[in-house]
Amino acid sequence: MPAYVIVGVDVLDHETALAYAAPAQQSILSHGGRYLVAGPTSDAVEGAWDFSRLLIIEFPDLDRAREWYDSPEYRRAREIRKDAARVRMLFAEGTPPEGFTLPS
């Protein structure tokens, strides 16, 4: 079942954030991830979305997303990013191929 990494970002240091972007992207791709959304936060329809950039990354499953996050490659990228951006991240499992059903 697919899993998603949903990230809200506020960039504090653009130069350092650019240095982070290449190794972060390579680590995502090498762990089977793919970007579904990557760009500025659009107009909020409901609630507060208090970050400037939104990313949604799909992985084949939750185990692969966790492996990516804990990988040496991404740990190095996070070290580059640590003072360059404020990040909020969560993992979410997708729905099975047969679709979404409400719990009974």
Image (cartoon, rainbow, N blue to C red):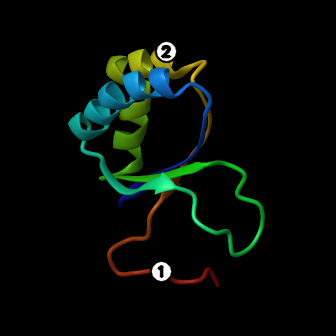
- What amino acid type is highlighted by mark number 2? Glu
Q: For residue 12, what is the image quadrant?
A: top right
Residue at label 2?
79
Residue at label 1?
100
Q: For residue 104, what is the image quadrant?
A: bottom right
Q: Nearer the viewer, mark 1 or mark 2?
A: 2
Q: Is residue 1 above or below residue 98?
A: above
What x and y, as percent, mark residue 86? 64, 32
Q: Earlier in the sequence, mark 1 or mark 2?
A: 2
> Viewer-proximal residue, 94 or 56?
56
Question: For the view shown, which residue lies furthest in the right direction?
Answer: 47
- What amino acid type is highlighted by mark number 1? Phe
Inter-mark Cα distance, 1 to 2: 37 Å
> Viewer-proximal residue, 57 or 95?
57
User: Few, some or many C-alpha atoms within 10 Å of disc 2 (few <14, some 14-19, many ≥20)?
Assistant: few
What x and y, as percent, mark residue 20? 41, 25
Query: Residue at image x 70%, y 58%?
Result: 49
User: Few, some or many C-alpha atoms within 10 Å of disc 1 (few <14, some 14-19, many ≥20)?
Assistant: few
Check the picture and name the quadrant holding the N terminus: bottom left
Query: Residue at image x 35%, y 51%?
Result: 61
> Viewer-proximal residue, 58 or 25?
25
What x and y, as percent, mark residue 29? 24, 40
Q: Secondary structure at mark 2?
A: helix
Mark 1 in CB contact with mark 2 (< 8 angstroms): no
Query: Residue at image x 35%, y 17%?
Result: 72
Query: Residue at image x 24%, y 44%?
Result: 32
On the rendered structure, is 55 left or right of 32? right
Q: Is residue 2 above or below residue 21?
A: below
What x and y, as percent, mark residue 78? 48, 22
